Image (cartoon, grey):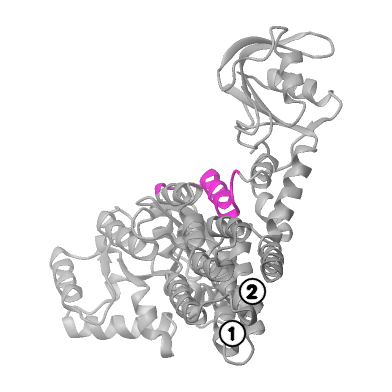
Amino acid sequence: MFLNSIAVWRMSSFIRKGFRFNLTNNLCCKAVHDADTIFALSSGHGRCGVAVVRVSGPASALLLRSMAGPRGLPPSRTAVLRNITDPRSQELLDRGLVLWFPGPRSFTGEDSAEFHLHGGPAVITGVLQALGNVPGVRPAEAGEFTRRAFHAGKLDLTEVEGLGDLIHAETEAQRRQALRQMEGDLSRLYQGWSQRLARGLFYAAAGKNTIQDVFLWAVTHCFSRMAQSLAHMEAFIDFSEDELIEEGVLNEVDLSVLQLQSEIEGHLQDGRRAERLRSGVQAVIAGVTNAGKSSFLNLLCQRPAAIVSPTAGTTRDVVETSLNIGGFPVVLSDTAGLRDTVDSVEMEGVRRAKERVQLADVTLVVVDSTQLPQNYEGVQIFLTNHLRSILPNGDDWIASLQRCLLVLNKKDLLSKEAVDSLQKSISQAEDLPPASLLSCLTGDGLDHLLDLLQDRMRTLCGDPLVGSVSLTQARHRCHLQQCVRALSLYHTYRNMDLALAAESLRLALTSVGRITGKVGVEQILDMIFRDFCIGK
């Protein structure tokens, strides 16, 4: 009996260590529920048909009663038409819909209310001023509603980031990816990594003790795969001398760690597709002077984004614009013409152009097609040498070619025979990137070029709805890399010191916990929520 009591005490100690972050989250939740009541315009600024003002906090019910008539609170989650008045002067501000969301069944987990108003500036200002005059009620900070939802356990950090990406999504592919993350696909993946060996640990550790079985049930339902591996290790260290652990437990831990490390390493090798989709594909227009790069930029933008002039070297700096090509976000950069020059300003432009080409996801090399030879061999040699003068050479040459598309401009200046001959030559070329004949003046050939670009976008970004979910944030990648390093340390310490091996698993668990917000995230909360708009 005494031995069982010691085992229970040790197990409860381990649970306290494993679930220390729960205490932190509970304190955060308490702080949130003790916080001020906040309000904000959630529907965006400017004139509109309907404006939505959101309120959240302990005084929400009182505000709704004082501003939406004496008839009491409306039924929860039901829109009701009410007169909306100033709680001090009782002046009528508007007549609109009000909704009541009692906590915890609300977005923030707190008592919340919404006022759906007519969208004129005077109406919105009047309601916001009336709310701001109530003691204990203040305007919300950027992202504060979502931050309260996070602290209340309504969302984890990956879902919060998905919500932020959805708000900022500008293309169809970005919307799909953000929705998938906001719905918890990434969170479930990471938590799925977190479920494995708890049952084996605690059945072995607890034996048939009833109190210990209670601990077993709690941990089995809450631990992650890495936490479970850590649980096995901690149990082996704590209970092995008491002969409460079955043989082979460490072998199960070894197998679990190896499999988990392999899965995370595979997840990291995603080609940064989701990160690229989130931030935009970096496409750079490069080439020699007077090849028609700025005209090409203007054609893609359908507006005069860059100055076009017959004078060589007109573009000195990088001209950047954002485009939506086939539902994928593209950040398109026009660069200075590449040539030798003694002009210090143009030299700096050439340096910046080469730097952009080094970092590009796609390089659109614009060539004056009137300068090309008429025979197949001549075209092959000319374009190969031309690309070597523009793209990075050395070990990255093959990769540079794979990132490149050739834009053969000034098609309108060629005869039909020359166009046919050139198309035949580039179709037969084996060591050249995909090419498209184009006239920036007439737009002839643009559809073919856009098809090539869309194919390249699909390759670079993938389909956000197909396959396993990918990494969307640089911080996710950083934490997972730390996790892999910690799992590697486990193998190093496994036969040297079990306590150090267990600490390596704890570090790995902490790294994954930082992604979803389970442990140690206060220092990154401000960075995540500052990009949210007021009222979200």
Asked if 462 appears above or below 162 in the picture, the reply is below
Residue 210 in percent (x, y) is at 59, 57
The residue that label 2 is drawn on is 507
The residue that label 1 is drawn on is 489
Dividing the image into 4 quarters, which one contains the N terminus? bottom right
Most frequent secondary structure within the magenta stretch: helix
Residue at 53 percent of width and 55 percent of height: 221
Q: Which amino acid does label 1 sit on?
A: Leu
C-beta proximity under 8 Å, tags 2 and 1: yes
Asked if 299 appears above or below 134 in the picture, the reply is below
- Residue 390 seen anywhere in this rendered image of the structure: yes
- Residue 477 seen anywhere in this rendered image of the structure: no
The verdict on residue 324 being magenta is no
**Front one among 466 and 428:** 466
Is 52 left or right of 365, judged from the image as shown? right
Which numbered disc, 2 or 1, marks the residue that appears first in the sequence?
Answer: 1
Is 287 left or right of 378, judged from the image as shown? right
Which segment is the magenta one?
Answer: 154-172
Tell me the SS state at disc 1.
helix
Residue 337 in percent (x, y) is at 47, 72
The single residue placed furthest to the right in the displayed view is: 135
Residue at 68 percent of width and 45 percent of height: 147
The verdict on residue 162 being magenta is yes
Figure quadrant of residue 75? top right
Q: What residue type is labelled 2?
A: Leu
Asked if 187 appears above or below 54 in the picture, the reply is below
**Front one among 400 and 18:** 18
Figure quadrant of residue 74? top right
Is 446 left or right of 132, judged from the image as shown? left
Tell me the SS state at disc 2.
helix
